[in-house]
């Protein structure tokens, strides 16, 4: 059966930057194993399969696969798919549209602005409020896992931990951008440090961005998912909202932070994390970013 597909670059307004994404339309009839095999064929961080929604008021249901596993929720697939579906619905004409996407982690409301025939910006509400779900090993073990020195771990009271807004990440603060750049997974020590609660995903960050108008500089490693490094990770940014709540303690009101990712890979990505705080508690986390169509074609699978 011939199936339409598109590829997009996400969390960027320029082609050949950001995080590449494949979106397969007309996915009815595909088995789980077939979808996994197609994701391996594309060999991108994630591939999305668009299906009919369970409720007619929703725009679509999404299945999201890395080359190795299915995910219940992911940020750059949500942003990219929301932009693509809005481009198709509006026939590439500029405009704004709201839509709801069904993902395994829950319903994800999205607000999209189409700016030209191949480009738009989407912001979605995280399907779950982020929370800390566990601890990571001591700094020495984390340093071994990331090929760093224990002195590279931590800054301004930020501490490592496992955080999740639907997908867990081992979030590790590093002292400098230089330390973030030097970091790399180190095989068995990495698996030992991040392989249980964090399910093999490490999100490292510092408060020394390349652009002073941005807030954080980050990288994400998930070799067990078939993704040695991800250029942009919206689900990690959503989980990171609880990191900010715990260690920066923002006041009541609306807050916005731009997170840089992908620069070490030559795929610069910019993720906007917006937070609503009331009564000293996080009430909503939103992830926003741009996406641009790179290619389209027919999949014979």
Image (tube, grey):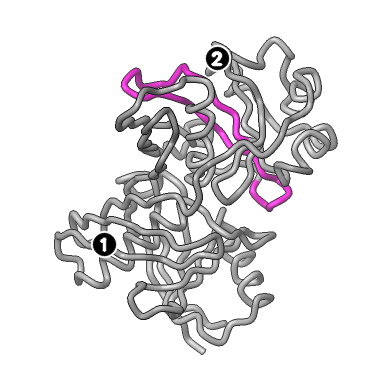
The quarter holding residue 181 reads top right
Q: Secondary structure at mark 1?
A: strand
Image quadrant holding the C terminus, namely bottom right
Would you say 200 lies left or right of 101 here? right
**Residue 87 in magenta stretch:** no
Would you say 138 lies left or right of 77 here? right
**Residue 207 in magenta stretch:** yes
Work out whether mark 1 precedes mark 2 in sequence or the reverse, and give the earlier one: 1
Residue 30, percent from left and from top? 59, 82
Residue 240, percent from left and from top? 52, 35
Would you say 55 lies left or right of 87 here? right
Residue 300, percent from left and from top? 53, 83
> Considering only vertical position in the picture, is 272 above or below 26?
above
Q: How many marks?
A: 2
The residue to which callout 2 is attached is 176
Tell me the residue at 50%/50% (across/down): 128
Residue 137, percent from left and from top? 78, 27
Tell me the residue at 51%/46% (across/down): 235
**Label 2 crowd (10 A; few <14 / some 14-19 / many >=20):** some
Q: Separation of disc 1 and disc 2 at Cα?
A: 39 Å
**Residue lying furthest bottom:** 1
Tell me the residue at 37%/36% (across/down): 275
Seen from the viewer's position, the closer of residues 7 and 260 is 260
Report the magenta residues as a range. 203-227
Numbered mark located on residue 98 in the image: 1
Q: Secondary structure at mark 2?
A: loop
């Amino acid at each position: 059966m011939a199936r339409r597909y598109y590829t997009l670059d996400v969390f960027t307004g320029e082609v050949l930057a950001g995080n590449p994404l494949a979106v397969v339309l007309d996915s009815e009839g595909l088995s789980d194993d077939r979808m996994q095999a197609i994701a391996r064929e594309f060999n991108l961080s994630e591939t999305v399969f668009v299906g009919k929604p369970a409720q007619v008021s929703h725009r679509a249901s999404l299945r999201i696969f890395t080359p190795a596993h299915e995910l219940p929720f992911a940020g750059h697939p949500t942003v990219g798919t929301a932009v693509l579906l809005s481009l198709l619905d509006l026939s590439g004409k500029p405009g704004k549209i709201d839509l709801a996407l069904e993902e395994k982690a829950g319903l994800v409301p999205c607000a999209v602005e189409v700016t030209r025939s191949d480009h738009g910006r989407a912001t979605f509400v995280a399907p779950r409020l982020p929370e800390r779900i566990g601890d990571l090993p001591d700094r020495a073990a984390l340093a071994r896992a990331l090929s760093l020195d224990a002195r590279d771990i931590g800054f301004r009271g930020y501490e490592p931990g496992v955080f999740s807004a639907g997908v867990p990440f081992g979030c590790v603060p590093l002292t400098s951008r230089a330390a973030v750049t030097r970091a790399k997974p180190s095989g068995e020590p990495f698996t030992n440090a991040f392989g249980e609660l964090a399910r093999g995903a490490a999100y490292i960050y510092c408060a020394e961005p390349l652009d002073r108008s941005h807030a954080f500089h980050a990288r994400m490693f998930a070799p067990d998912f078939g993704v040695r490094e991800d250029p942009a990770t919206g689900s990690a940014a959503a989980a990171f909202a609880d990191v900010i709540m715990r260690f920066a303690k923002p006041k009541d009101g609306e807050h916005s932070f731009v997170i840089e990712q992908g620069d070490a890979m030559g795929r610069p990505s910019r993720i906007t994390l917006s937070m609503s705080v009331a009564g000293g508690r996080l009430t909503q986390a939103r992830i926003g970013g741009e996406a641009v169509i790179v290619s389209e074609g027919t999949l014979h699978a």
